[in-house]
Amino acid sequence: MIDPRKLFQLEGGQKRRKLALTFGALERDINGMAEKGMEYTFTSMTRADYTKEITKILLKDPKLTPKAAEELESLLKAEPFDELALCNRARHHLLAIIGTFPAEWDLIIAPHASPTDENGVVIKRDFFPGVCVYAEDIRSPFNIGSIFRTAEGMGADKVYISPFCIDPEQPRAVRSGMGCIETMGWERLSLEELPEDLPVFALETGGTPIDEFVFPEKGICVIGSEELGVSPQALKRCTYGTVTIPMKGLKASLNVGVAFGILMEKWCESLRSKASTPQK
């Protein structure tokens, strides 16, 4: 945290960026998930008073809209005072001024349960061994980033991508991946090069409803391209079967990243259930 007097002395863009980071750090501290070294430690004022002081600095920003200023003034005067709400709204208004509009990657992320070193850096991922996904010909950088983010978050072991899949290191993919592309292990392989010792199944229409599908303890789930779905060649390789998400809508269509998220939750639910069942 930075002293409000020092924040006040900063200029323009530098002040806005520092304020945005400070409000974000305060949100984490209020939620009990402060990053190492970013805990609130000022003894000269309470955290609530600190939040009010830096909000007053933001209120002097000439680019803050009258409507945003009115909202912040109202939160400042509210009884009881809600410091989390003030931090959140102040940060979002700052991001709008800076040009980085609030989106899903701005959400507060809970501390990782994986082991960390003395500096709080994750040294080893926690995942389900052998739980893998094969992204076949995914074209959208946002979709491939979303797939990596879901795979990492749900505990997949590895992501395989097809020869014609978009590069996961494309800038927009990296952005939507929220650091998960760098964290996850991944490899570009053809269908023929997929590991022979893992069962392969597809997420596609016309298969077993997801609530009835018996997920393997280890395996590779193939998800197809946005336009064409899983290819006939891939379906032939999926000897473990096909799983389908039943839908009621007229379009009966889901974004591939969303569909993969539903699939991973069901697969992980199955794995957790098996792990908690006593062995006979």
Image (cartoon, rainbow, N blue to C red):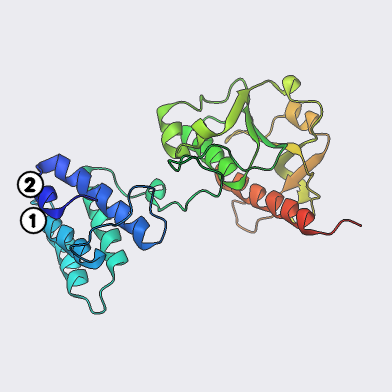
Residue 123 is situated, as x and y percent measured from the top left of the image, at 53, 37
In front: 214, or 117? 117
Q: Which quadrant of the rendered structure holds the C terminus?
A: bottom right
Q: Quadrant of residue 59?
A: bottom left
Q: Which mark is residue 60?
A: 1
Answer left or right for 207 relative to 27: right
Q: Quadrant of residue 241?
A: top right
**Hey, what amino acid is under mark 2?**
Gln
Considering only vertical position in the picture, is 105 above or below 189? below
Considering only vertical position in the picture, is 256 above or below 234? below
Q: Which mark is residue 108?
A: none
The residue under the point 60% across, 55% down is: 250
**Cα–Cα span, label 1 and label 2:** 12 Å
**Secondary structure state at the residue bearing disc 2:** helix
Answer left or right for 137 relative to 88: right
Answer left or right for 138 relative to 189: left
The residue under the point 47% across, 38% down is: 177
Viewer can see residue 256: no
Residue 71 is situated, as x and y percent measured from the top left of the image, at 20, 66
Answer left or right for 160 relative to 22: right
Q: Which residue is mark 2?
A: 9
Q: Point out the residue furthest to the bottom here.
A: 79
Q: How many marks?
A: 2
Crowding at mark 1 (Cα within 10 Å: few <14, some 14-19, many 20+): few
